[in-house]
Amino acid sequence: MRQLTYGGVPIPGLNDLVRTAIRLHPAPGEPRHDESHFGGPLLWPSDEPWPECPVTWPPDPDASDDAWAGGHPLDGPVPVMVSAAQFFRDDFPELPFPEGTDVLQILFCPMQHNSPHHQGPAVRLVWRDSGEVEDIADPPPAPEEADVDLLPAPCVFEPCSIDELPRLCDFPPETRAALGIPEDAHDDPEGWPELDQYSKIGGWTPWYTTDRHELGCRECGAELRQTIALATEEDEVGCGCDVAEAQPAGWSFARQDVLHIFTCPTDVTHPFKVRID
Ligand SMILES: [Zn+2]
Ligand SMILES: [Zn+2]
Ligand SMILES: [Zn+2]
């Protein structure tokens, strides 16, 4: 890639900030359990219990590090979760997979939970080795009290890739210094490229409605990294591809926002965080 410039001046280190995101381009479809998808059937073994909401008391140590509180009574039956997404390593080698696994499954508890940062579904990430799954489980019906805005509709993907630059709040200190940006500045540099919203793997976080804070790993202290974005709306922005359906996955987070999943770069099985932005 050519040396990136700012105000016509080449800025050393700026190229290192570019992240290539895989835009998913979800479209309504009928995915199988052995395919990557939003909201389709999961490759889930019949001899493994179907996952329940991680927002429990006492808290589930395997759940995300989001201090989720409430959303449904904590002393009643724990709601079952619904399939939100499935990604095979063969389709998306850009995703981190723990040793010995080749599929990532994302499940929602389809109700509004309160976290210190936003309201939204509770989330679980499950990695597994697809070769070990023999009989496939029939998913239980979604909880009766489920919020229809959080029930994913089946989608298949037509991915493309987009190079993204971060917003100012994600700049490393040396880049801020090279660009001469004051410590207390909050606005992106003039003429800085727009960071659009869409479902994707990798890339940067737009931080349009949420402040960037508390993204340290609870386990090791490393700064968590933007890993997966599940967007409410898909628009014809950023890449020039056609978008047939504006809300293909049927879900709607907060104010038509994007649910971002952040994982630890040291070890992806460390507690993840969710931010709806
Ligand atoms: Zn829940
Ligand atoms: Zn960590
Ligand atoms: Zn595209």
Image: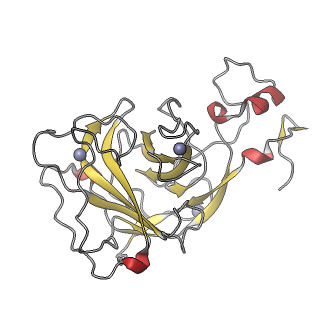
The answer to whether residue 240 of the structure is visible from this angle is no
Image-quadrant location for residue 84: bottom left
User: Which image quadrant: the N terminus?
Assistant: bottom right
Q: Nearer the viewer, residue 115 or 233?
A: 115
| Percent x, y of residue 167 | 64, 36
Q: Residue furthest bottom?
A: 134
Q: Nearer the viewer, residue 115 or 269?
A: 269
| Left or right side of 77 for 17 | right
| Left or right side of 248 for 169 | right
Q: Nearer the viewer, residue 247 or 135?
A: 135
| Rendered residue at 83%/30% (across/down) | 178
Position of 161 relative to 156 (above/below): above
All told, the count of numbered labels is: 0
| Rendered residue at 50%/30% (across/down) | 214
Q: Nearer the viewer, residue 270 or 248?
A: 270
Position of 46 relative to 217 (above/below): below
| Rendered residue at 46%/46% (across/down) | 260
| Rendered residue at 17%/40% (across/down) | 72
| Percent x, y of residue 79 | 17, 51
Position of 209 relative to 112 (above/below): above
The answer to whether residue 143 of the structure is visible from this angle is yes
| Percent x, y of residue 88 | 48, 71
